[in-house]
Each structure stands twice: as C-alpha cells, then as structure tokens.
Image (tube, coloured by chain):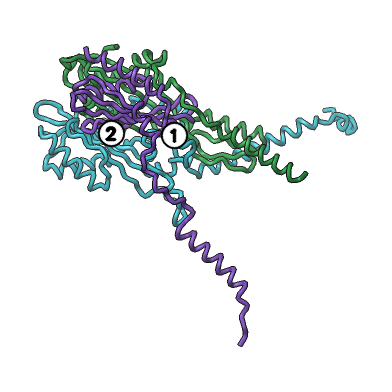
Amino acid sequence: MKRRSLSGTGSLGAWLALAASLQVYGCAPTPSQDLFALTEAQMKLRSFQTRTFDVKDRQLALRGVIAVLQDLGFIIERANEPLGLVTAARFSEPNYLEIVGVTVTVRPQADGRMMIRANAIHNNKPIEDPKIYQNFFASLERSLFITKE
Amino acid sequence: MRGSRGWARVVLGLALLGLSSGCVTVPPEEIFQLSPESPKNRAIQTRMFQTSNEKELLSASAATLQDLGFEIEESVWDVGFLRAAKERSAREWGQHIGRFFVLAATFGYVLMPIDLHQKIAATLVARPLNQERSRHEVRIMFYRVVWKGEGYVERSGIPPGEQKSEMIRDPVLYQQFFAKLSKAVFLEAHKI
Amino acid sequence: MTTMPKRARAETPRPIILTRAIRGLAMGSVMGLCLFAQGCLSYEWAHQIQWDSRDQILTSEESQVKLRAAQTRLFDTTDRTEVLRAAILSLQDLDFQVEVLDEELGIVSGKKFVEIERPKLTYDPTYHLYDDAGLLLFTRQYRRWGPFWHRSDLVRMTVTVRKRNEAQLIVRASAQFYLRPLEEPVPYQMFFRTLEQALFLQGQLVE
C-alpha cells in the first residue's frame, strides 16, 4: 500500500476551500447592526433641515418649492403631490464633478401650518452645514410670499 | 536606505493619487442662494399665458415636446410638472478631425475620446400667477448630457463613458419652443 | 535637360528632422486611415455625424410635416379614457413597458429593448453594469460605462391624446429608435391598426 503524500493536496485543498468560500460569500463587507440607527448628529441635522411655514395649501407650498428650485438652477427630477415630495438636482457648470441633489418634503401640520424639510446631498455625501439650509429657506420664503399675492 | 526610498515612493504615489483624483470638496455655500444670473435665466426660460386652463397648457406642452422629438418621461399634472428626454448621436465632424490630427501629430500614441452619445432633456413646470388662476406661467429648462467614447494614451486605454453635462442657455432655442407652444394653444406667449 | 552631377546631389541632403516629420505624418495618416476603416465597421459610424451636436436639440422643419401626418390620426370619439386604455393595450401588445400614464393630460409613454447589436460573445457581463434608471437625470458617478452600447437597442414611444374639436380626438404617436426619431410611416401605420382594433373605431388621417 503506497502512502500518498498528502501535504501538496492539503494546501491545494485549502486554496480550493478558500476560493469556494469566496465564491459563496464574496468579499462583501457585512452590514453593521446600526446601519439604520439614528445618530445624534442626524437628529441635530434634522432641526436645521426643517422649517414651518404659514401656508395653508399643500399644492401651493409644493409649487413654491418647485419654483424656487428652478430659480436656483435646479433640474426637477420627480414631483409627487399627494405625498408632497420634490426631488431635484443640479451640477455646477462647467465642472461636472460637483453635483448637488435635494429632496424636499411638504407636510401639513395639525395647526394648519406646513412643515417643509430639505435634505441636500453633495457628491453622494449629505450636506451638514446649517448655513446652507438657512439660505435655502430664505430663498423659499421669498418665493412663497411673493406668490401669495 | 532602500526601505526609506520605498516609503518615499509610496508617499509620493499617494500624494499624486490624491491630487489626480481631486481633493474632497466642501459644498459651496452659494448652492441655495440666488445668483446674479438667476433673473436672466428665468426671463429666458419663462413665458406667461392668459389662460385659466392649466391642463390644456400642460397637454399642449407635452404635444409640443413630442413634436420636437422628445419622449415624455414623467408627468404630474397636479403640480404642473412634465419631464421629457430624447437620445441622439453627439458625433461631431470637428472632433473627428481634431482626433485625427492629434493622432498624426503624436505619431499614433494618443487617441482622444470624442463625444458619441447625448441625452437632451427638458423639465417643464406650469403654475398659476394669481389667486384667481386666470394667468399661468410656463417655465422650461433644457439641458443635455454627453458621453464620450474610448481612447488610449500610449497603450493605456481610456475607458468610454466620460460624461459632461450642460445647461442650455441659448435664448433663441427657448424662443423657438415658446413659439411652437404658443401656436399649439392658440395663445400669445408673453415675456415676463 | 541638364542633369545635376551625382556629387552635387549628394552635397544637398534633406534635413533629418523633416524626414522624421514626414515619416511620422505618414505613419499617423496610415494609422488614422486604419482607424477610420476600423471605425467604419464599429459602432461610431453607424450613427449620425454633424457639425454641431447642439443642432439636435430642436428638430428641423423640413421633414416635419410628412412625419406629423404619419404619426397622427383622428378618432370620432370624445372618450379620452377609452382611447388611452386602447393605447396602453397596444403598447403592451408591442411588449412596451408603460412608464408614464397621465389620464388628465392624455399621455402614455413606454420603452422596450430590441434585439439588435447584441455582443457577439454569448454573454457580456458589462451589459448588466448599465443602469437604465441611473440615467434618470445624470449619473452620480464621474465615469460610467457608456450607455451607447446599450441605448442603441432602446425604443421609446410616446402617445398623446388631445381634444381636436367637440366631436373628435387627435392621437399622436412618436417613437425613438437607434438614437434617431422613427420617421418611417409603416411602423406607425401598424401601430394605429392595432389601436383601431382595440377601439373598434377607424382612425382618419389629418389633412
């Protein structure tokens, strides 16, 4: 009975097993358990991103948001009236590398006012500077109260 | 000695990589501030119509865009929003000729990628201008995205798909669109 | 005819740089011609070329009138919902995915992919890298595998239904194929035949 040398086949087996496991599991990172957990920073950001306006009609508010976004040079991507949602994006010409996307939601509150929230993303990273959101709401306020006449 | 030179190379390489891939940019503050060109752009892109029938205005806009070869991609009548696009070839003689001369001048080492494909899109919004909704304004924005083909520089290939976006700012184009829309609704398009 | 003595000719050599430049230009030209020739067989030359690609933004008026006539039919009905329903049925029959439907404005739009210019290999994994929805606005990534390989087989179609007068509706169908507007009248005739069958109505041409 010839004893077969197993050392070579052992390492080959190990490589094969590794290759097989990579095929099965891939090299993908596993998602952390807190992927969708709200952080402190996000809660604080929400207050910058939200403003309440004295507008009774959701459609009017939504149209105001669309108008101000167009004035700011944004291209409206999606608009949904029953859900009060507008998505828009713009790129800084002529340099394509910078792209800003914004999602604005309009929700009527119990006291008859309208809550407007804007989420802006710059090159796939959320914008966290409160001053930028202040600018947006300042422009929006101007637009909303001009159309009220 | 060799170790430190190796590290120096790594650091230099990383530095160059960082420079070439662009530094991480901070969002500019002016994105949500009206720029000095905003009123000019608004004037080019907007016309006022003396009508209370917003749906007819939107329907005619869709028909006008269709006449111009656009395909409607999104339509939300309750906020007066239309989005349309068309895809066309973006090949230009000038770029082909330029590419040939660069190829000849570099003795075949550099083949520049040229524009191949473009998507021209338009977003249109109609809204009432007063409480009685007796006047409406229509604002349309044209933009296009152009993709380049492949090329090579001295044996290393440049992959295809380089993208360039452009807002259309030519007032004549917008005038022509509103002339057609005006004919479709039998109304005059007033400048704002 | 006086012939220069050989020695005199040997005393006037051409500059070396000029020789190299001529050689380089010749090589470049040959390579360029080869590329042109290769280009003739490749994707590029199958598509329109123009002096200014911005000319495509608004169409020209020359062929518009005939095309408009081929794309439009009048129907003796005022039931726009019914006509829209028939248009959706016709698009579905043609394997279109209906993506836009607006009953109030009378718009139906859909798209489908046809079997042309598929890669010669049995399976091209890069075909699936192409994200159709990613081109919604403009891609968020700087460089993207060009859509051209995968847009040439896209057919988009839009049908609009509008009121012509108190008794008639006007239906217009427009399609895009292979990065060009579809200008052949026959495909539109076939589409309207399907639509008429779904509606049990005869469509008339617009004068």
**Is residue C115 placed above or below A11 in the rendered structure?**
above
**Is residue A17 placed above or below B91 in the rendered structure?**
below
- How many marks on residues? 2
Locate residue C162 relative to residue A43 in the image: left or right.
left
Can residue A128 be seen here? The reply is: yes
Can residue C205 be seen here? The reply is: no
Which residue position is annotated with label 2?
B74
- Give residue A8's position: percent from left, percent from top: 62, 72
Q: Chain of mark 1?
A: A
Question: In the rendered image, what is the letter of the chain coloured purple?
Answer: A
Disc number placed over residue B37 in the picture, else none: none
Question: In the rendered image, what is the letter of the chain coloured cyan?
Answer: C
Q: Residue at x 37, y 50 (%)?
A: C115
Question: In the rendered image, what is the letter of the chain coloured green?
Answer: B
**Is residue A70 placed above or below C127 in the rendered structure?**
above
Q: Chain of mark 2?
A: B
Which residue position is annotated with label 1?
A125
Q: Residue at x 63, y 43 (%)?
A: B155
In depth, the one of C38 and A106 nearer the eye is: A106
Secondary structure of the residue carrying tag 1 is: strand
- Give residue C161's position: percent from left, percent from top: 19, 32
Amino acid at pointer 2? Glu
Amino acid at pointer 1? Lys
